[in-house]
Image (spheres, rainbow, N blue to C red):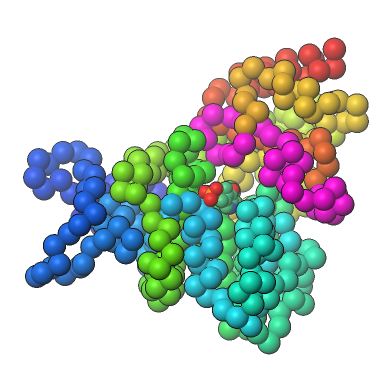
Amino acid sequence: MASHKNSGQKTICVHTGETPDKQFRGAISPIYMASSYEFMEVDVKRYPRYFNTPNQEFLSKKIAQLEHSEGAMIFSSGMAAISTTLLAFLGSGDHIVLQKDIYGGTRNLVEEQFNRYGIKYTFTSGLCVNDFECCIQQNTKLIYIETPSNPLLKIVDIAAIANLAKSHNILSVIDNTFATPIIQRPIDFGIDIVLHSATKYFGGHSDISAGALAAKQEHIDTVWNLGKNLGGNLSDFMVWMLERSMKTLSVRVKAQQKNAKKLAKKLQKNKYVDTVYYPGLKSHPNYELAKKQMNGFGAMLSFKFIDGIDSEQFLKALKLIKPSMSLAGIESTMLLPSLTSHALLSPEERADQGISDGLIRFSVGMENSDDLLIDINNALHKTIG
Ligand SMILES: *Cc1c(COP(=O)(O)O)cnc(C)c1O
């Protein structure tokens, strides 16, 4: 396999980790669907659940190179990557500090399962470094962050958290799903482990469920040890699909974030819009920090209308933008966190996180921005009546 160590991101996306087709010399990676490999006189004993079939091994190189890590692993979902990682490093009596507003599924994992394993946890009260530091205890083993956060696109200082963790000899873990390595490479700031829901931007076409981890080899080994027991590997066919998707990761994410920035500015000027949450707006409280640690500001934003405009009616009136769950596809989607991702929280908990019932989360796709804007304006006029 050719190394693309010093290549640009687009080249890495297209080429790194191609499985060579030595037999027919095809231009793309073949799929090796074998679940049985020879064991005698081989360097590696391969098996899907050992995360080392050819397609898994090679695509991991692309992910590792994008994230500037030593290695990577591919899982069957983002939650498979997250749960395997957390349980690999935490045991009975250990403590984890988690960012206050993280992905709902991760929060559910912690709140619904950790007590059974005797794992202690604390969610921070805020997103400043001090809010994390004051939660650290004698038995704290891990700090977990997610930035930009869902759905209000709050920004956590990655370098500061990595330093805090190092100074206490604690492992730092980030969910980098919203930014992708195209926009943010946490390992460069000292973070130990990077997690992804590859169902989102890595897949990008709303047709793949997958997850990924990028880290140093020693941490990969620890996760692998539990991963082979839990069995959250992805089938080789889907690994191949994911490779195909990741070839366009850089161009997709850049096109989508360009649209997002344009639309965030337009929405901010709209007299029916009360607030726009997007780290690329100067009005965002963490604009400077986002600028420092991100290469652009991503393609996710949220907004809320002024009082009297019914968000549900607005979503129903859209023609081009789909009111859909999930995010990060090339097609634009909108949803109400209060009815979907954050529906399990009580109204008080939602209010505490600043999520009003009418808040709309907008996953900006790569359609023409003018078409998206026309759709928004038409739906808005229909809603106002
Ligand atoms: C979707 C998502 C996850 C979970 O990923 P799945 O692939 O659905 O298991 C984790 N973190 C973030 C930020 C997500 O958006």
Q: Is residue 331 above or below residue 128?
A: above
| Residue at 40% in and 68% down | 229
Q: Is residue 31 left or right of residue 287?
A: left
Q: Locate the C terminus and report the quarter of the image it occupies.
A: top right
| Residue at 63% in and 72% down | 116
Name the one closer to the observer, 1 or 104. 104
| Residue at 62% in and 36% down | 325
The x and y percentages for residue 59 are: 32, 53
Quarter of the image where one finds residue 169:
bottom right
Q: Is residue 17 above or below residue 167?
A: above
Name the one closer to the observer, 180 or 209. 209
Based on the picture, tell me whether residue 133 belongs to the magenta stretch. Answer: no
Looking at the image, can residue 61 be seen?
Answer: no
Q: Is residue 39 left or right of residue 170?
A: left
| Residue at 24% in and 44% down | 31
Magenta segment boundaries in residue numbering: 325-354
The x and y percentages for residue 305 are: 83, 31
The x and y percentages for residue 318 are: 68, 20
